Image: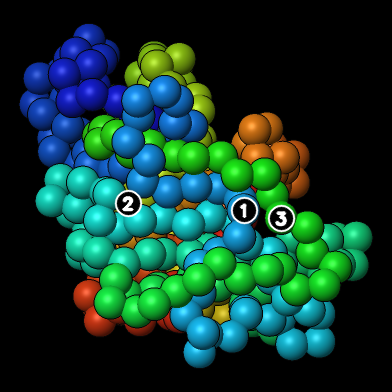
Amino acid sequence: MTHGSLSALRSLAHQHLSPDVAETWLGLLRPGVRLEVAAGPDDVTGRLGGLPALPATAEWPVWEGNGPLSFVASIDCAGLPTASLDIDLPKAGTLLFFYFDGQLDDGEALVLAEDRTSWAGARVLYVPADETAEERELPAGLRPYPVVPLTARTEMTAAEPWHPQIRETFAPGAPLGQRYGHPVCSEDFLDALWQFDDEVGHQIGGHAHSVQDPVEIEVAEAVLDGKMPWSDPRLSDEAGRWLLLAQFASEDAADMMWGDVGALYWLIRPQDLAERRFERAMFTWQCG
């Protein structure tokens, strides 16, 4: 929902919340890596678009029955400030993100978290640093997105008050995904947060900047087959098991538009991340 320096967020919290509530809220912030368009002397830690570097033995990701996925982004893990994060990212190697973006069928087939048959339409590949990889040409019918180099910057991130973790702290048992009677849900505080930062942006780790409801709830609903009411505590428990791996917003410089100025999100469970089981990452997307 919000990202910025700890000092700036601390100042904002203490302007609008009581000291005790402000400190509790600040304790729920999480460090994340903002990925911004690199310029001049900026260190480059990844890029949007272009061609992916794949090992010779790696197959291009395909959604069976629909076609190959488009290449979205490449992240050099060695260039990330992994020591500053609270997720167990590889310290080297490359993360590659692929998504079936509608180039081949004019957007007819949609990749939706709630549709298990579409899950193959988004993929994360990890290429270890000791594997030889070379740029691979795109499959026929796909055009590459323009290359946009990215630089990394660590910031603190805040989740929306109706995020399961925040709700559990301030209002256990309140309806999932809804506002509740607490100062962190007040118009005054929410307006201050949105005025402070309303940019989704590109990010690794931290709290996701969801465009709509918390993406963790969407993923939890999907893995539970969407059969569980939001009042069931098992849905909240499942949502708490997922962490943001990466988000990529719409980006003019890369000619990327996800729906109506939306964003792509990949989430993963901590154990799968620790075991480098990136094929278990879950995908969802949101737009305004």
125 or 212: nearer the viewer: 125
Q: Nearer the viewer, mark 1 or mark 2?
A: 1
Screen quadrant of the C terminus: top right
- Disc 2 residue type? Gly
Marks 1 and 2, the one that precedes in the sequence: 1
Few, some or many C-alpha atoms within 10 Å of disc 1 (few <14, some 14-19, many ≥20)?
Answer: many
Where residue 268 appears, x then y in whole percent?
A: 38, 69
Answer with left or right where residue 155 lies relative to residue 97.
left
The answer to whether the residue labelled 3 contacts the one labelled 1, judged by CB atoms less than 8 Å apart, is yes
- Rounded to the nearest angstrom, the CA distance separating label 1 from label 2 is 23 Å
273 or 239: nearer the viewer: 273
Marks 3 and 1, the one that precedes in the sequence: 1
Marks 2 and 3, the one that precedes in the sequence: 3
In this view, 269 is above or below 264? below
- Disc 3 residue type? Pro
- Residue appearing at x 30%, y 25% in the figure: 4
In this orientation, does residue 255 appear? yes
The residue that mark 1 highlights is 50
Give residue 144's mark.
3
Q: Quadrant of residue 260?
A: top right
- Residue appearing at x 18%, y 25% in the figure: 6
- Residue appearing at x 56%, y 67% in the figure: 135
